[in-house]
Amino acid sequence: MKIHRLSIVFFIVTLVMYVAGNVSLPITDPVESAYALTAKEMVISGDWLSPQIFHQYWYDKPALIYWLIALSYKLFGISDFAARLPSGLLGALSVAWMYQLVRSISGRRLLAIWSAIVLGTSLEFWILAHGIVTDMALLLASVGTFGYAYRGLAEGRTKWIVIAYLFAGIGVLAKGPVGIVLPGLLFLVYAGVMRSWRMVRLLFPWQGILVFLLVAGPWYGYMYHTHGQAFVDGFLGLHNIGRALESEHPADNHWWYYLALFPAASLPWTGAVIYGMYYGWRQRSDFYLFSMIAGWGTILFYTLMATKYSTYTFISLVPFSFLGAVGIVKLLRIGADRRLWWILMGPTFFLWGLLAVGSYFVGWGFWYLLYVLVGVGIVLLLACYFNGKRYLLPAVIGLVTMLIAGVVIYEGVAPLVIRRSSVDYVPAVEAFRGQVYYYDGYSTSLVYYTDREVIRINSDYAPEEKRSAVWNGKYKMPIVSEQEAYAHLSKEQALVIVPRRSLKYLQQSPLMGLFRVYAEEPGVIIFMTGSGLVTMGDN
């Protein structure tokens, strides 16, 4: 298997893009902090096989993401940068592999280049390449599974199918059974559309199944051997079957949820993706048919699931990016009527304008560079458009969008992330030696940063989210009721962190009579209880 030189170039360039700025992004609640803390406990405990959080076994996700973050901690020290590094690395590998596979399958360099660029510069991809989530690992596995399985079916060669099973094993270690169930369903549908029993037989080589079991089997076997039914009930029952049958967040359970997210995820290339779908339908090549099945099949699959998360359909960017490249290459090749180029320019102007207007309403950031880049980008696009150099439009869009994204990361995302993290009030908590409580919520990032036990106080006055009680088993943080908290807080010196959004509920509670203000931060008020109460200003 030949590694194309541009694959290496894509990897290096995108790795720099995705890693730059991570040092200024603290760990956020509630998702990122759970993965960062679990990996930290893995390093500290020395148990790299059974994930733990709050010193309890946790079966939310398989071990791959924790291994990657923990390995980063071992190499670079426990830090925010190290926690974010794996997603940046996986993102760069995904872009490089996208180029590699499209080039190998199609034999068309230009199509492969734009497939990689569209994937690597799409809005959702850019965001998650800086995040601490499992989805980027699943996307890399999906690039390999989709690409090699398709190549194996197209060429009738078991070798590529076996490699696809290897990537499917990685996907199952990254996200769970969906790493093989979803690709398997999509390829069966594709074989059905192609009316090929030969393809169905090719999909199940014993060598591929063996490779899959060798990759994914050892960890799952160990977990079942060590934890037995508790692992089956927690991992498979709650976090997989439970998510499919019982909505974790019923307010988001709308049939159109992913259809609404689809246009935003691919910005600024949404128009190119849609045009690629339209143009490709007229040609209906095999690769086009599979890409349509993989993209829309993924959206349909997760639409049928009870739980909705914005990142679940993330892997649909893989086939949709290829379709976007089809649209771009078609525009470049046909010397299209200039009105067609608004297919690219319209969504681009929308994204740039949205970021510029949005920055005006936020209370932080130095945005003048953003306004300059948006202005320069618009001038360049219009100059290319009116001066007959429309073939430069995709390159200008990709370059300027990346520069704008860099500014947004530094000036907009970093301050916003801080507001979703405990990092600002960590010093106040570290200066206090008593027990720490969190009212009407929890902050895993506070445990990550301070290594302190934090007990959640369930409010009697805050409205409860209407959802199945089965989801109560998801949370591992120590929890007490208001009555239990009152019994402790009336006798001991403690800190109670209260989100400002929950202050109105606390004011209705008898607990309020026990408190004095210890410190105030933009997102929270920290109270102290017990004898010898002082405020931070009194020290």
Image: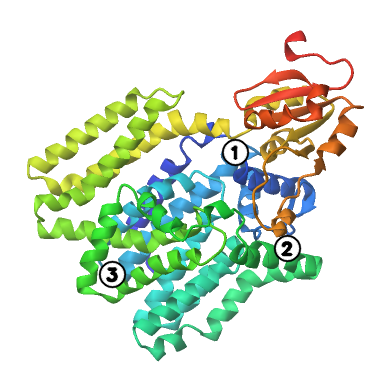
Judge from the rendering whether residue 424 lies leftward or rightward of residue 44; answer left or right.
Answer: left
Q: Residues within 10 Å of mark 3 (few under 14, many from 20)?
A: few
Mark-to-mark CA distance, 1 and 3: 41 Å
Tell me whether the residue at label 2 lies in contact with that at label 3, contact meaning CB atoms closer than 8 angstroms: no
Q: Quadrant of residue 525?
A: top right
Q: Is residue 110 visible?
A: no
Q: Earlier in the sequence, mark 1 or mark 2?
A: 1
Q: Is residue 479 left or right of residue 245?
A: right
- Percent coordinates x, y for residue 440 in the rendering: 71, 37
Q: What residue would you read off at disc 3?
A: 106
Residue furthest toward the bottom? 197
| Above/below status of 100 relative to 472 | below
- Is residue 159 placed above or below 221 in the rendered structure? below
Q: Amino acid at mark 1?
A: Thr
The residue nearer to you, when weighing 25 against 468, is 468
Name which residue type carries label 2. Gly
Q: Nearer the viewer, mark 2 or mark 3?
A: 2
Label at residue 234: 2
Q: Earlier in the sequence, mark 2 or mark 3?
A: 3
- Report the quarter where the C terminus lies: top right
Q: Given the current orientation, which residue lies at the most extreme top position?
A: 538
Residue 28, numbered circle: 1
Residue 514 or residue 285, whichever sits in front: 514
